Amino acid sequence: MMRGYTLPMLTSDHEIERLAQIVVQRAGDGAADKARKLVEAMRRQGYHDEADTWLRVIVAIDALGTAPASAQLWARAVYPADTPTCD
């Protein structure tokens, strides 16, 4: 398995949205592009289920970019950048 990239337990929409928030906070404006490259690498290495999960994350990242500013501010308040993660 690709250590640090597999997400076998993330299945709920809430978990996917939370991960999208974290990815955007860490990667910034290029978050979706970086995630797409990750998906391509995972597919090449045979990690199809994990790549499918990351595709859901990409959709959530794209949705964050189109969310109203008030929703983005709310998300930052609910999910601050210093929230601990399981790396």
Image: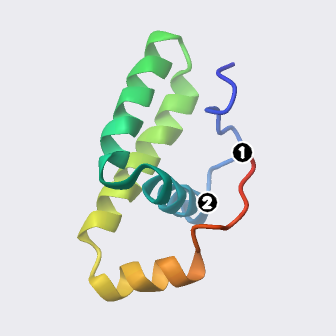
Q: Nearer the viewer, residue 81 or 79?
A: 81
Q: Percent x, y for residue 82? A: 65, 67
Q: In this picture, is 51 found above or below 79?
A: above
- Quadrant assignment for the N terminus: top right
Look at the image and tell me in which quarter the C terminus lies. Answer: top right
Q: Are marks 2 and 1 in contact (CB under 8 Å)?
A: yes
Q: Residue furthest top?
A: 45
Amino acid at dot 1 = Met
Residue 18, how many percent across, how many down? 56, 63
Please state if 25 lies on the left or on the right of 40 as rendered.
right
- Rounded to the nearest angstrom, the CA distance separating label 2 from label 1 is 9 Å
Label 2 sits on a secondary structure element that is: helix
Badge 2, how many Cα within 10 Å: few under 14, some, many 20+? few
The picture places residue 2, in percent across and down from the top left corner, at 64, 21
Please report whichever mark, 2 or 1, sits nearer to the chain's N-terminal start: 1
Kindly identify which residue carries mark 2.
15
- 80 vs 9, left or right, is left
Q: Is residue 83 left or right of residue 24?
A: right
Q: As displayed, is residue 40 above or below residue 72?
A: above
Q: Which mark is residue 43?
A: none
